Amino acid sequence: MRLIIKTCLAAIFSLAVTHAWSIDPVALEKQYAAEAKQAAVVSRGERFFSSTHGKEWTCASCHGVLPTKEGRHASTDKVISPLAPAYNVKRFTDEAKVNKWFKRNCHDVLSRECSALEKADVMAYLNSLK
Amino acid sequence: MKIYKNLTRIVLSLGLIGLSHTIFADGHLSPIKIPEKIKAECASCHMVYQPGFLPKESWARMMSGLDKHYGVDASLDPQAVKEIGQWFSQHAGTYKRVSGSPPNDRITQSDWFVKKHRKINEKTWNNPKVKSKSNCMACHAGAEKGHYDDDGARVPQ
């Protein structure tokens, strides 16, 4: 009996852990929009993605004008797998990775962190690409 | 008795085949195995440069300034910085030509690099297929595995 309880507890625990770590692109869009207290707008996200913001690079400089395809790193030329979740199921499924890259890339494109609304818009745009 | 001797021979030769296979499977010129963590964190943007290309001091400076990594924000969490920094420090170059840090801790500005590439003209460096001096693999296809021999180098046209 004790063993059964232990197994159940372990299963619940591991589920809880996996749940806490795994995210999905649509939930992420909603989360950012909730943080921003505004609804995300696809067209605004698209414009944000392909515009410069005071520096040399845009998001599209590395991720491609069409993020449904492979991009190339603007300085090293390394191939970057597609960013749009419909074309790359691994995208936006690991929270730590998402935070790491938003922080880095926003600094490279905007010289600051992106706002929740900017992230919500970009996610809406990427999620709209089917 | 003879059977045993033959058996021993077979077992030994099989062992040798296995051994040579492991060496080659790892890229026989690559001096060290690159841990998955290093691949995941460094190779998203560029190939993993062999730690022997720079001295310890250069790697240490690089790891302490990842938020300004050659014009790009490559910041990592403290644990990853520690782990990756240790690996580079442990395997850093000790050979006399990497004894001093090159300008800006750039491999491509090391004396040996400049000398080795002195015959490569600007047109080649500016070729979109090369793009940057840091793009070793544009000409050295086996660079990622530590293969840089002149014979294997192919300059894209």
Image (spheres, rainbow, N blue to C red):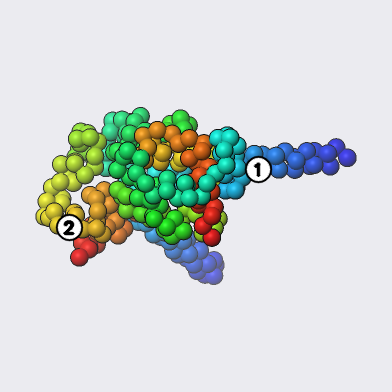
Residue found at x 42% / y 45%: A48
Residue B6 image label = none
Camera-side residue of B50 and A126: A126
**For residue B107, what is the image quadrant?**
top left
Q: Residues within 10 Å of mark 2 (few under 14, many from 20)?
A: some
* In the image, residue A86 above or below residue A58: below
Q: Is residue A6 left or right of residue B150?
A: right
The subunit letter for the residue under badge 2 reads: B
Camera-side residue of B49 and A125: A125
What residue is disc 1 on?
A: A18
Q: Amino acid at mark 2?
A: Thr
Q: Amino acid at mark 1?
A: Thr
Residue found at x 51% / y 57%: A129
Tag 2 secondary structure = helix
Residue B124 image label = 2
Residue A45 x, y percent position in the rendering: 47, 47
Q: CA separation, marks 1 and 2?
A: 49 Å
Tag 1 secondary structure = helix
Q: Residues within 10 Å of mark 1 (few under 14, many from 20)?
A: few
Q: Is residue A22 left or right of residue B55?
A: right
Q: Are marks 1 and 2 in contact (CB under 8 Å)?
A: no
Residue found at x 48% / y 35%: A115
Camera-side residue of A26 and B129: A26
**Is any atom of residue B61 visible in this view?**
yes
Residue A75 x, y percent position in the rendering: 30, 48
